[in-house]
Amino acid sequence: MRLVIRDEKLAASGYVAQYIIDRIHKFAPTESRPFVVGLPTGSSPVLIYKALVARHRAGDITFKHVVTFNMLDIFFSHVVVQPDNIHILNGNALDLEGECGAYEAKIKAVGGIDLFLGGIGADGHIAFNEPGSSLASRTRVKTMAFDTVIANSSFFGGDMELVPKMALTVGVQTILEAREVIIIVTGAQKALALQKCIEGGVNHMYTLSALQLHPHSMVVCEENATLELQVKTVKYFKSIEKVSKEFGIAQTIPISIQLGSPVTDANPAESAVLGKDTRSRQDSANEDFAAVVEGIRLAPPTKPSLRAVTPELFPDNMASRVSPTSRSPSLGPEDRSFDRMGSRISSGNVLA
Ligand SMILES: N[C@@H]1[C@@H](O)[C@H](O)[C@@H](COP(=O)(O)O)O[C@@H]1O
């Protein structure tokens, strides 16, 4: 998991917005190969949406071939994404179970989610996967925790009575299957939840902690949200960014995920010419080692590693420590054998 910390909410949101724009540019989606995003509800992503809308209006980015799976009908969807590409869970459907199953099927039909953007509840939940949710859960009906009802009352004029007590939500497993997950965390009120999810173990009481099992997850937060983290945790994650900047190493996800690698039925020869990856997207998503390999490829040349040299092959070290004058008949048996070895090496012979 990556943890990116920025001083302010605005900077954290700007970072995520730019990240999404870069991902879409690199992916270069088309009608038949759209970029698929999962979008959350809540107030945390609002600044990100605003930044994306502004950049869209400035002509920096198009969302023409972006498909969204929204938790709710948010303004962003209407402004920039084509209506046909927007999928929203309908909490008023007559058959709620059918609605949830169909949602999962639609995600599968478009090839899975490339990037799931999420927030976090003050109790550590992701989407509406409240404490105690199965970490293997899929899209389903969920009863909201009291805390969540309070948090969401701001969207209902502060009236808790108006807040639905149940919601349809993607499951933890649905989220874990996204090829990449980014979480935005703002506000000191989220600090304890963030601490549990980052420094604690994987735990169904803090469902965001399941991201520890995801090969490509990133939490972007403002400094205030780190208040409960250990100083060494904060310093460590900050140092990762600093070091990679110094060494010119891009902290990237595998190229196959960035490009949305073609499916396995691609002609291998053609793929080789195009430099494309022929693995299936799902396979690629699971290859976290690829990220490491890529990091190594991007690393600038360094001094040859000493560990690459077998100690036995170090020349002449022993001989150079023994000066000819110190080789006296008074040496003990062990020293004499040391002396003999040294003299053979220093005379340029190779020991057989
Ligand atoms: N289901 C949503 C979550 O997706 C969201 O992350 C959380 C936090 O909301 P906010 O960002 O407003 O703090 O609220 C709700 O419970």
Image: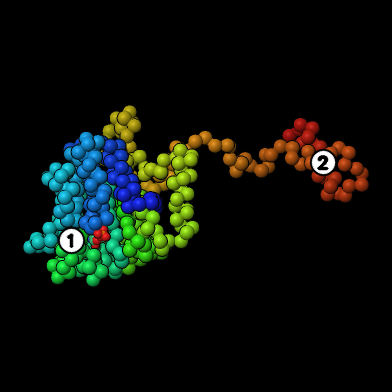
Ligand 1 shows up in the quarter that is: bottom left
Residue at point 27% right, 33% down? 267
Disc 1 is placed on an element classified as helix
Left or right of 220 on screen, residue 327: right
Q: Residue furthest left?
A: 94
> Callout 1, which amino acid?
Phe
Total count of labels: 2
Give the spatial CA distance, label 2 vs label 1: 83 Å
Looking at the picture, tell me which residue is in the foreground, 88 or 270.
88
Residue at point 33% right, 63% down? 189
Q: Is residue 337 above or below residue 138?
A: above
Disc 2 is placed on an element classified as loop
Residue 155 image label: 1
Looking at the picture, tell me which residue is in the foreground, 69 or 154.
154
Q: Callout 1: 10 Å neighbours few (<14), some, many (20+)?
A: some
> Callout 2, which amino acid?
Val
Residue 322 image label: 2
Q: Residue furthest right?
A: 330
Q: In the image, is the residue at mark 2 within 8 Å of ligand 1 by its beta carbon?
A: no
Q: Callout 2: 10 Å neighbours few (<14), some, many (20+)?
A: some
Tell which tag, 2 or 1, sits nearer the viewer: 1
Left or right of 342 on screen, residue 97: left
Q: Residue 231 placed where, x, y %?
A: 47, 59
Coloring basis for residues: rainbow
Looking at the picture, tell me which residue is in the foreground, 301 or 98.
301
Residue at point 60% right, 43% down? 307
Q: Residue 306 placed where, x, y %?
A: 61, 41
Instruction: State which quadrant residue 251 falls in.
Output: top left
User: Mark 2 or 1 closer to N-term?
Assistant: 1
Q: Residue 198 placed where, x, y %?
A: 39, 60
Residue at point 38% right, 50% down? 6
